[in-house]
């Protein structure tokens, strides 16, 4: 048999065979793996590109709306103390410096010895004009009274200056990000240089990613076995802030780099830089985040960016890497050290000279603590927000950067808060039965103050403590006004006279103040009672209102007809009221704002001007999207309104409102106490010719207060009005054209004679004034006493009839 064939040995793998195999594997990878990988990469790139473009070209930030107070007009003749001038400056972040050194917006100096005040006003964008700021020199008399003002540069007199509105609150969702958007051109070049030196000195050389910085950062990270070194360019930082979290991972860094490359390929360097200076986070002020160079400049140095020194610019740039640790207000030493590092980098990169560097390093770090109250008028702000919510979607209010200008005077608001706190403390100390331990059961008080001619709401304090109760008693509470409603009856009576009705009633006409019963529909009856059942007998209408006599007032309403009172109440803004006799004594429920509106008609000679809080709404581009248009309607005649003013003046001068005079309130004023029969509500409503204020006091639970309006509410009203009117011109009530003033004998109603023991001013519609001289008081006649008024003439008649 043939022998078995010898097995052949395996041929070893040749290099060619290996190369061939690798080539086949590579081709397989190229054909089956690379296309999906490339597809995935370009799809991912395109998605990132869309995301970057959408953000960079669209709305980049949610800008909260800001609510501002009214501005303050200052003129010669005013007192700095009465204006709360220096407190206003502190809230507006003005800072005192040495006399003769005021040269930057937001600075002022005050020399008490020479009576000189210098102030460099901030610039401000008002709804209808832009103010660039100016230096004003004020000459004072007695170190407090403004004698004159002038421009120190030209020497020209200045007749008034305007302090800008105060920021009182914001409307935001989530976090309150304080950010003012600015153009790159509005930022000083040196500030931009400082930021580039601190964060990315090769910004104009790379394309979003800086390989040099990446290598340096990678070496540090590798040697430390952690991600510690930031290799991010300025563009990468912006992408991270816009789109990414603060997670430290290679995956996030890669995404950040790709997005930075996309941004640089789509947008110019200046566009990226402008976004960056508006976006960077630079610390906190209370609950507000400080974002962007402009906000940081105002917060830390109370300056606009254009007014910063080189050292201050370097301080802001140095904070970017660690805003809280390098905060110059809290950590000045660390902030100074970092500032100097930034200045050294600027010198090294050629941004500044050695001379400028030395001067900036030598600068003292003058970070200035600013006023940090987040809401100076919480009840008022809630009122404004409620009005805005009726006209604007929530998304607009929280994201569109609206600026809302209001009527509020922050100084007056604080005076109101102080008056209420002090009055409630005094009441609880004097009447311990009023004190309560439970916060939600405590005695409450509210105040609203407005200008009757314009309707501007100047102060609104809705309760004793907003933190405990956000219920705004000025607008939301409905309580009985009691005697504060009585002037409506007297206006209706005088209107009857002006209309030549069957009954002729004047302030000097007589009425019997006595117990009586009013019979009305379906055999119903009502018997009004005076306070503590004291009755005064035969009195004038003027005396009846002065002493708030219930019986006399209701008898007047009965005489002219309840329908006339209800008609007058409707004209004064109380709407359609039920036809019950108790209405004439305030047996209805109204809000303090409603009562203030009615009294403002009397104060403004019969003009009804609705109270308002918002003067203008301006969008983020400075366009006025809403402005207040004054509306006014003549609802009663000037003659009738003036008769009401006169009657209410006598209440303060001689009647239940006289304690205001005893407390030192001397200027012309008119007003009325309000006390309900069950003594659950106490009021005082009163006004000068240019300011009206209403105060209510009581328990939300409607517990018995057992105090009159004069005891409970008048002290707060007086305290507030004394302070609030101190900086206003002192005016008297001017007689209406159809009214004649005559000196009369209040005991008889006749024209006063030289022998009348008591005389008083009387007001009369022209043609109704008394012409007959008092026949009772003659030489040798026995004068009638106040306690035995002669029964002349008959009740409800005029001496001339």
Image (cartoon, rainbow, N blue to C red):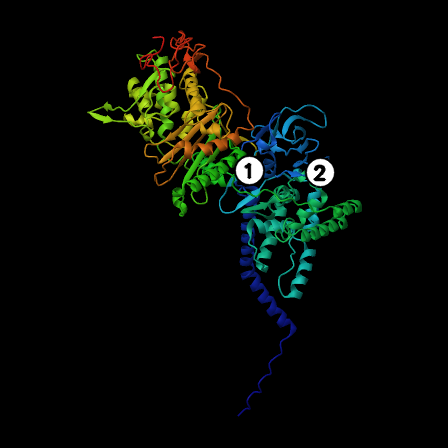
Task: Determine contact: label 2, label 1, CB under 8 Å.
Answer: no
Q: Nearer the viewer, residue 758 or 451?
A: 758
Q: Nearer the viewer, residue 372 or 473?
A: 473
Q: Secondary structure at mark 1?
A: strand
Q: Is 235 positioned to the left or the right of 172 in the image?
A: right
- Residue pushed farthest right? 355
- Whether residue 500 is visible to the viewer of this picture, yes or no, is yes
- Whether residue 205 is visible to the viewer of this picture, yes or no, is no
| Number of residues whose C-alpha sits closer than 10 Å to that of mark 1, classed few (under 14), some (14–19) or many (20 or more) | many
* Residue 525 falls in image quadrant: top left
Q: In the image, which disc is placed on residue 529?
A: none
Estimate the x, y position of residue 7 in percent, counting from the top left.
57, 85
Q: Is residue 187 above or below residue 452?
A: below
Rendered residue at 51%/20% (across/down): 732
Estimate the x, y position of residue 326 in percent, counting from the top left.
65, 52
Q: Is 356 positioned to the left or the right of 734 in the image?
A: right
Q: Secondary structure at mark 2?
A: loop
Residue under label 1, please give it.
167
- Residue pushed farthest top? 772
Q: Is residue 92 above or below residue 239?
A: above
Residue under label 2, please give it.
98
- Residue pushed farthest bottom? 1
Rendered residue at 68%/32% (across/down): 118
| Number of residues whose C-alpha sits closer than 10 Å to that of mark 2, classed few (under 14), some (14–19) or many (20 or more) | few
Q: CA distance from mark 2 to mark 1?
A: 27 Å
Q: Nearer the viewer, residue 4 or 361?
A: 361
- How many numbered tags mark residues here? 2
* Residue 61 falls in image quadrant: top right
Which callout, 2 or 1, points at the residue further toward the start of the chain?
2
Q: Is residue 746 above or below residue 97?
A: above
């Amino acid at each position: 048999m043939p022998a078995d064939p010898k097995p052949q040995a395996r041929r070893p793998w040749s290099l060619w065979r290996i190369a061939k195999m690798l080539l086949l594997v590579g081709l397989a990878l190229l054909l089956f793996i690379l296309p999906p990988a490339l597809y995935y990469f370009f799809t991912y790139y395109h998605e990132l590109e869309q995301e970057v473009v959408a953000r960079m070209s669209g709305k980049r930030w949610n800008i909260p709306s800001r609510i501002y107070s009214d501005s303050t007009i200052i003129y010669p003749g005013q007192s700095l103390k009465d204006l709360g001038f220096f407190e206003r400056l502190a809230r507006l972040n003005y800072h005192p410096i040495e006399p003769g050194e005021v040269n930057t917006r937001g600075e002022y100096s005050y020399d008490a010895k020479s009576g000189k005040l210098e102030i460099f006003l901030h610039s401000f964008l008002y709804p209808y004009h832009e103010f660039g700021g100016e230096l004003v020199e004020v000459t004072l008399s007695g170190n407090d009274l403004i004698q004159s003002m002038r421009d120190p540069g030209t020497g020209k007199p200045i007749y008034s200056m305007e302090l800008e509105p105060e920021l009182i609150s914001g409307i935001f969702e989530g976090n309150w990000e304080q950010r003012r958007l600015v153009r790159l051109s509005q930022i000083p070049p040196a500030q931009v240089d400082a930021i580039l030196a601190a964060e990315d000195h090769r910004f104009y050389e790379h394309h979003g990613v800086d390989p040099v910085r990446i290598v340096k950062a990678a070496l540090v990270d590798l040697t430390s076995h952690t991600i510690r070194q930031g290799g991010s360019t300025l563009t990468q930082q912006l992408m991270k802030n816009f789109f990414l979290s603060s997670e430290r991972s290679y995956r996030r860094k890669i995404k950040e780099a790709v997005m930075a490359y996309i941004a640089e390929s789509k947008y110019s360097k200046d566009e990226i830089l402008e976004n960056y200076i508006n976006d960077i986070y630079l610390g906190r002020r209370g609950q507000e985040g400080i974002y962007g160079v402009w906000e940081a400049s105002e917060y830390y140095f109370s300056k606009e960016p254009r007014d910063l020194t080189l050292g201050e610019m370097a301080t802001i740039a140095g904070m970017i890497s660690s805003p809280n640790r390098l905060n110059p207000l809290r950590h000045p030493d660390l902030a100074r050290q970092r500032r100097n590092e930034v200045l050294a980098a600027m010198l090294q990169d050629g941004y500044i000279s050695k001379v400028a560097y030395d001067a900036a390093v030598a600068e003292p770090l003058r970070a200035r603590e600013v006023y940090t109250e987040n809401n100076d008028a919480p009840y008022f702000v809630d009122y404004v927000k409620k009005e805005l919510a009726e006209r604007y979607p929530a998304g607009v209010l929280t994201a569109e950067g609206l600026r809302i200008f209001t009527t509020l005077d922050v100084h007056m608001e604080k005076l109101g808060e102080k008056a209420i706190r002090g009055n409630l403390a005094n009441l609880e100390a004097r009447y311990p039965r009023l004190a309560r331990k439970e916060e939600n059961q405590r005695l409450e008080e509210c105040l609203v103050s407005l200008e009757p001619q314009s309707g501007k709401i100047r102060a609104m304090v809705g309760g004793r403590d907003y933190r405990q109760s956000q219920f705004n008693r000025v607008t939301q509470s409905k309580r009985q006004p009691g005697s504060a409603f009585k002037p409506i009856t007297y206006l209706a009576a005088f209107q009857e006279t002006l209309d030549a009705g069957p009954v002729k009633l004047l302030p000097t006409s007589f009425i019997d103040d006595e117990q009586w019963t009013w019979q009305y529909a379906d055999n119903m009856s009502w018997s009004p009672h005076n306070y503590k059942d004291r009755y005064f007998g035969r009195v004038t209408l003027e005396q009846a209102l002065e002493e708030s006599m219930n019986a006399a007032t209701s008898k007047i309403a009965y005489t002219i007809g309840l329908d006339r009172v209800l008609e007058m109440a409707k004209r004064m803004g109380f709407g359609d009221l039920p036809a019950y006799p108790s209405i004439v004594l305030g047996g209805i429920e109204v809000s303090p704002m409603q009562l203030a509106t009615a009294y403002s008609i009397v104060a403004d000679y019969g003009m009804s001007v609705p109270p308002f809080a918002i003067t203008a709404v301006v969008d983020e581009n400075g366009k006025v999207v809403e402005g207040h248009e004054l509306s006014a309607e003549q609802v009663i005649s000037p003659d009738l309104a003036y008769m009401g003013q006169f009657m209410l003046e006598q209440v303060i001068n001689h009647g239940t409102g006289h304690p205001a005079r005893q407390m030192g309130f001397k200027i012309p004023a008119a007003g009325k106490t309000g006390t309900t029969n069950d003594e659950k509500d106490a009021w005082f409503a009163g006004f000068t010719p240019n300011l009206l204020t209403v105060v209510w006091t009581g328990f939300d639970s409607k517990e018995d207060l057992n105090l009159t309006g004069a005891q409970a509410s008048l002290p707060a009203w007086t305290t507030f009005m004394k302070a609030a009117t101190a900086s206003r011109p002192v005016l008297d009530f001017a007689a209406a054209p159809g009214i004649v003033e005559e000196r009369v004998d209040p005991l008889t109603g006749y024209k006063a004679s030289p022998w009348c023991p008591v005389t008083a001013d009387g007001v009369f519609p022209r043609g109704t004034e008394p012409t007959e001289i008092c026949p009772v008081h003659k030489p040798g006649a026995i004068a009638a006493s106040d306690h035995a008024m002669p029964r002349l003439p008959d009740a409800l008649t005029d001496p001339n009839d």
